[in-house]
Image (spheres, grey):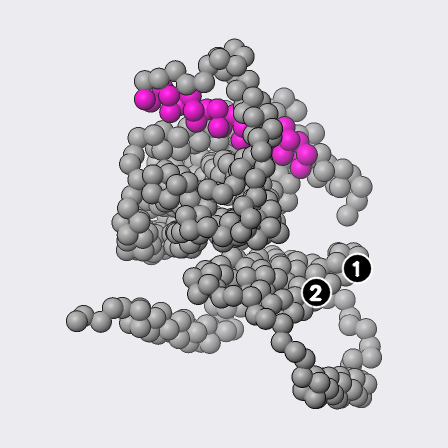
Amino acid sequence: MSPFLFWIFALMTLIFGAGVVINRNPVASALSLVVSFLGLAALFMSLDAFFVGIIQVLVYAGAVMVLFLFIIMLLNLQTEERRRINGLAAAGGIGVALILLVQICFVIGHFQAARQTFPPLARSTTDDVWNIGALLFSNYNLPFQIIGVLVLVATIGVVLLSKRQPR
Amino acid sequence: MDFFFIITSLLKIVGILFVVILPMVSYAVYAERRVSAFIQDRLGPNRVGPAGLFQPIADMFKLLLKEDFTPRAANTFYYWLAPCLAVMPAIITIAVVPFGSTLFGVPMVIADVNVGILFVFAIASLGVYGIVIGGWASNSKYPFLGGIRSSAQMLSYELSLGLAVVPVFMVVGNLRLTSVVLYQIGHGWFIAPFVGDWMNPWKWLLAVPMLISFFVFMIAVFAETNRLPFDLPEAEQELAGGYNTEYSSMKFALYFLGEYAAMITGSAVIVTLFFGGWHFPGIPDGSHGWIFGLINIAVFFTKVAAVIFVFMWVRWTLPRFRYDQLMRLGWLFFFEIALVNIFLVAAILPYSSRL
C-alpha cells in the first residue's frame, strides 16, 4: 500500500468525521459518518485486515447507519439553527483541548518505544479470516461464548420491549 | 504492484463494465418487455430494428432528451446524489465475482479477495442508501413512503441472504468466491452434485440443505433487488411509483439501470455459488488454450442470462405480497429456515468425510 493511498483514506476519514459534528443537517451528518466508516475500512484493508475492514462496512455502514438514517427521517428532524457562539465556552473548550494535546505530546515524548520505528510485521501464511476464526474458537473461546450469551439476552430484551402489550 | 497487473486489471474493469454489464443491463430491459409480452400473449416492442433489437438505444435517446425536472422543494445535492448511489454498489459488487477461468494466463476476476462473499454483502447493503436518500430528498409523500418501506425490507431480507449462504461456505471452508467455483468443479455443482464421488450417499444428503439454501437465497435476492413478488418500494398502484416518483429523464433512467444492474450481479452471485460459476461439464479451463477461456466466460454469462430469465418469469407470474405478509415471511419463515439449515449442514458434514 503506497503512502499516497494512506493519506487519501486517512484524510477522508478525518474530514468526514469532522463533517459529522460540523453539519447542521442530521441526514448530512449521518451520511458523513458513513463515508468516514468507508475510509476507516479502507485503512484496515491496507493493513491486510480484510475481514475487519469488510465487517466495518457490512455492520456499521450497511446496517447500523441505515437504521440511524431511517430513524432520523421518521422523526423528521429539522436542520438546527446556527446558534450564536458563546465566546467563553469556546475559549474553555479550545483550552482543554490544547492542554490534552500538550499532555499527550509530553507522555509520548517520554515513552521510549514510541521513538523507534515499528519492526515490519511478519506476513501470515494463512489468510486473516482463518486466523480470526482460529483465535476465536481456541484462545478466546470463553469470552466469545460469553458475548454470545450477552447478545442473545439483548435480542430477547429487544423482542420483549417491542412486543405490544395485550389490552 | 507491477505494471502488468495494473494494465490487465484496467482492461478487465473496462471490458466487464462497458462490453458486458452495461449492454446486458439495457438488453435486460428489452428482454423484460419481450418476456412479459410473451407471457401475456402479446408481441412486445418489435418495431425498432430487426425484432425490436434496437429498442434499448431508442429508449436511451428518449430518456436523455426528456426534460430533466427537479422539484422546487427537493434537497438538490442529495436529489442528484441518490441515483448515483443506487447504481454504484450494484456495479462494484461484480468486482469479486469470477466470470471466467483464465485468458492468456490472466485470471478472469477483477479482485480475488479472501473475503469474497462478505464483500458482496457489504457493498450490496450500501445499495439501500440510494433508495432511502432518493425518497427523502424528493421531499414528497409517496417517494418518502417508498424509501422507508424499502429500507425496512432490505434490512430484513439481508439477514436471510447472509444466513442462507453460510452452509455453502461451511462445505467449501473458504470465503473466496474462486475457491467456491473450484470446489464445485471437483465435487459437482451445489445444486446438482453429479461429478466426483457422486455415489457417496452422505453427499446426496448434503444436497438437500444445499437446495434449501439455494431457494432461500434466491428468494432473498428477489427481495433485495426489489423484484416483483417483493417490489413494495415501487408498487405502482399503491405508491404512484415509490421512491423514484419525482425523478425524470436520465436520473430516472439511472434508478432503472441500478435495479437491473443489481439483478445481474445478484444472478452472477447465484450462478457462482450454486451453478458452478464458469464451469460446464466437459469443457476444460483457460489453461488449455485461449479459446476455452473465452468459452468459459460465455458459459458464465449464459448461465447468468438463464437466471435473469427466471427472475422475469417469476415477476410476470406471481402477484405482489402485502407489506405485513412480506415482513412476516422474512422474519418468521426464511430467517428460521436459513438458521435451521446451518445446523443441518453442521450435523451432516462430519459424516460426509469432508469430500
* x, y percent for residue B258: 53, 39
Q: Which residues are magenta?
A: B12-40
Count of marks overlaid on the render: 2
For this view, does B138 lie left or right of residue B81? left
* Residue placed furthest toward the front: B72
Read off the residue under disc 1.
A3
* x, y percent for residue A144: 46, 72
The numbered mark, 1 or 2, whose residue comes first in the sequence reads 1
Residue positioned 44% across, 48% down in the render:
B143
**What's the amino acid at mark 1?**
Pro
Read off the residue under disc 2.
A15
Vertical placement of residue B53 versus A30, above or below: above
Residue positioned 34% across, 70% down in the render:
A158
Vertical placement of residue B48 versus B187, above or below: above
* x, y percent for residue B328: 28, 53
Question: Is residue B23 something that shows in the picture?
Answer: no
Q: Which mark lies nearer to you, 1 or 2?
A: 2
Q: Splitting the image into 4 quarters, where does residue B339 fall? A: bottom left
Residue positioned 64% across, 44% down in the render:
B111
Q: Splitting the image into 4 quarters, where does residue B67 fall? A: top right
For this view, does B148 lie left or right of residue B39? right
Question: Is residue B325 something that shows in the picture?
Answer: yes
**Which subunit holds the residue at mark 1?**
A
Closest to the observer: B218 or B180?
B218
